[in-house]
Amino acid sequence: MSLLENINKDKLPEHIAIIMDGNGRWAKLKGNKRIFGHKNGVAGVKNSSEACAELGVKYLTLYAFSTENWNRPKLEVNALMELLVSTIHSETKTLIKNDIKLNAIGQISELPEKAQRELQDAINATSNCKRLTLTLALSYSSKVEILNAVKRIATEVKLNKLDVNDISDNLFSSYLNTYNLPDPDLMIRTSGEQRISNFLLWQLAYSELYFTETLWPDFSKEDLYKAIITYQSRERRFGKTSEQILK
Ligand code: IPE
Ligand code: IPE
Ligand code: MG
C-alpha cells in the first residue's frame, strides 16, 4: 500500500505548522552557498502546500523567517527578502489555481517595503480562495506576539474597556496574530533539530510534535504523508486517561 493510502481521511489534522529548517546544511552538503539552499527550499513549500490542499488539510503555517534571523549576515538576509518577493510574485497564479489563500503573521512592518507590497498584493489576490489557508510566519517571534497581546489587553483594562475577570484562554488567543486560525494539531520540524525556536509558544500547547532528519529542500509530499500517518497513530488525551478517550 502506498503512504497516501495509509492516511485516514476522517482523522486529518485541521492545522499543520512547520519549522522549515536545514536549507543551509543542504547547500553545504552540495558544496554550495547557503542561499542556494534557500532557493531550493521553495520546493518544500510547494510540496507541503500542494499536499495539504489535495488531502483536505485546511490550514498550513510555515515558519519562514524569525525575528532572530535578522541577526544573520546582511547578504543572506537580503537574499532571503529578495527570494520572498520573487517567489510570491511567481507563485500567486498557482495559489489562485490551487484555491489557496495566503495569510501572514509576524512583524510584517519590519520587512522591506517591496516585500510588504508583494505580500499584500498576493493576500488580496487570493482572499476568496477556500481550499487551504497558507500562513507565512515572517519576522515572527512568539514572545513578541504574546507581549503585544499583553500590552493591548493591559491598555484596555486600564481604560475600563475590559474586565480583568474576562481575560480567558479564548480572549487571550483572540489578541494574537493567529486570532483567525485554530491551534495547530501537528507541528513538524525538519533537519533533525528538536526545539521550538520561538514559534507559536501559546498555540502549540497541545500540538503533536514530529521531528524528521529530512532537510527542508528535500521535503516531499511523501514526507508530509509520513508525518500525518505518525500523527494519526498518536492518542491525543488532553489530560484524560486512555480509557476515557476510547470510550
Ligand atoms: C531554514 O534553514 C531557513 C531559515 C531559517 C530562513 P536554515 O537557513 O536555518 O538552514 P540551516 O539550519 O543553517 O541548515
Ligand atoms: C527557525 O530556524 C526559524 C525558521 C525556520 C524560520 P533557525 O535555523 O533560525 O533556528 P535555530 O536558530 O537553529 O534555533
Ligand atoms: Mg536552521
Image: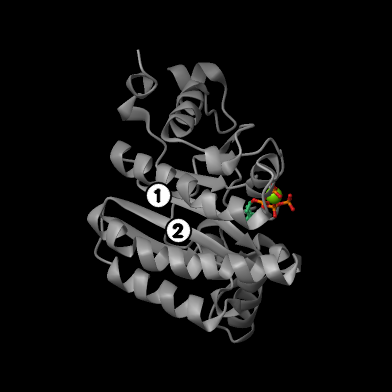
Residue 175 visible somewhere in the drawing: no
Q: Is residue 95 above or below residue 73?
A: above
- Which numbered tag is attached to residue 35? none
| Residue of label 1 | 59
Task: Name the side, left or right, on which 49 lies relative to 212.
Answer: left
| Residue positioned most to the front | 31
Q: Residue at x 75, y 67 (%)?
A: 73
Q: Secondary structure at mark 1?
A: strand
Residue 34 pos. (x, y %):
67, 54
Under mark 1, the amino acid is Tyr
Is residue 180 at least partly visible in the picture? yes
In the picture, the disc for residue 135 is 2
The span from disc 1 to disc 2 (Cα, nearest Å) is: 8 Å
Residue at 54% in and 74% down: 108
Residue 7 against residue 202 in the figure, above or below: above
Labels 1 and 2: the sequence-earlier one: 1
Q: Are marks 1 and 2 in contact (CB under 8 Å)?
A: yes
Given the image, on which type of amino acid does mark 2 rest?
Thr
Give how far across and how far down residue 90 sits, in percent: 37, 64
Picture layout, residue 100 above or below residue 26: below
